[in-house]
Amino acid sequence: MPDIIVAALYKFAKLPDYAEMQSDLLDFCLAQGLNGTILLAAEGINGTVAGSRAGIDALILFLRADARLAAIEHKESCADEMPFDRMKVRLKKEIVTLGVPGIDPNKKAGTYVPAEEWNALIADPDVVLIDTRNGYEYDIGTFRGAANPHTTSFRQFPAYVQKNLDPVKHKKIAMFCTGGIRCEKASAFMLEQGFEEVYHLQGGILKYLENIPAEKSMWEGECFVFDQRISVGQGLKVGTHDQCYGCRHPVSPDEKSSPKYQLGISCPHCFDTLPEKTRARVTERQKQNELALKRGQAHIGVAQKKQTAARHED
């Protein structure tokens, strides 16, 4: 069987008719046998979908037929199994939620830096390198020397900037994220705050891992992805992490050997803080998974990962 193609795509574009686009887009994706999630908003489109080579190609052509989406960005990787359970097209206020009115990357955004030029930029000692992703993503991999804003959602990024960065002191800012969308919007915000030199990695970490060979890479660890693969590594190969059912934090092979790791229940990140109601709920769910496995009705490894598809890049 051919590999399943996983396509991460986005485009900031003015889509005042985004609500009217929902039904036709969903019908098209279903007809192509695609699964995943696509977000539509007045500011553009964002999503990750998976399916056959023909299905993904058809979707990109379908989207590019709309002149507003002709230059849509997309990155591809492969999966051995379908990493999403179903197809959803959702309407949102923002395709990536910053929560600051008036930020429009269509009008103003930072300077794109191709993957091939990224190493030279971040090696500059005058550059402040910022990972715009959330803390649990940073924990399993990031670029050497990158600052961790310790956010749990993208909405917290503006507060981090206001507290820790100064346009007078910090002259050069470089930012990155998984696929490019968060740092593109973050760059528009930074420019609004008075920062003059703002750069962001074009195509995100995924494009860097795809294009830059391991011996030249400044990436350390794995990259969290928002599907049932959990993480990918150099060359976009499926990574080694699973995900905790209790707290949804990525779990490394070493962490799975900890006495605080309980399959389907907890991990070292949440063992001491997991609320009792949550512990009881996931313990019962794990019990039902094991009973189903004995009856031959489910594969527990798949069950462990299904929650990931509901989690998006905010």
Image (cartoon, helix red, strand yellow):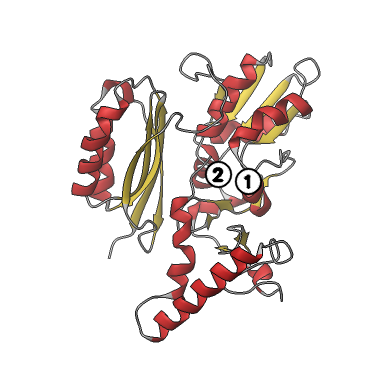
- The spot of residue 90 in percent (x, y) is 36, 39
User: Is 277 in front, or is 163?
Assistant: 277
Q: Residue at x 68, y 68 (%)?
A: 255
Tag 2 secondary structure: loop
Residue 261 in the image: above or below residue 55: below
Left or right of 166, for residue 207? left
Residue 112 in sight from this viewpoint: yes
Quadrant in which the N terminus is drawn:
bottom left
Left or right of 169, for residue 297? left
- The spot of residue 270 in percent (x, y) is 68, 62
- The spot of residue 6 in percent (x, y) is 38, 50
Identify residue for label 1: 216
Q: Residue at x 63, y 46 (%)?
A: 217
User: Is 30 in front, or is 174?
Assistant: 30
Q: Are marks 2 and 1 in contact (CB under 8 Å)?
A: yes
Q: Amino acid at mark 2?
A: Ile
Circle 1 packing at 10 Å, graded few (<14), some (14-19), many (20+), is: few
Residue 69 in the image: above or below residue 143: above
Residue 220 in sight from this viewpoint: no
Tag 1 secondary structure: helix
Circle 2 packing at 10 Å, graded few (<14), some (14-19), many (20+), is: some
Image-quadrant location for residue 160: top right
Disc number for residue 212:
2
Q: Residue at x 25, y 25 (%)?
A: 66
- The spot of residue 13 in percent (x, y) is 39, 22
Q: Residue at x 33, y 59 (%)?
A: 3
Image-quadrant location for residue 115: top right
Q: Amino acid at mark 1?
A: Lys
Disc number for residue 19:
none
Left or right of 165, for residue 247? left
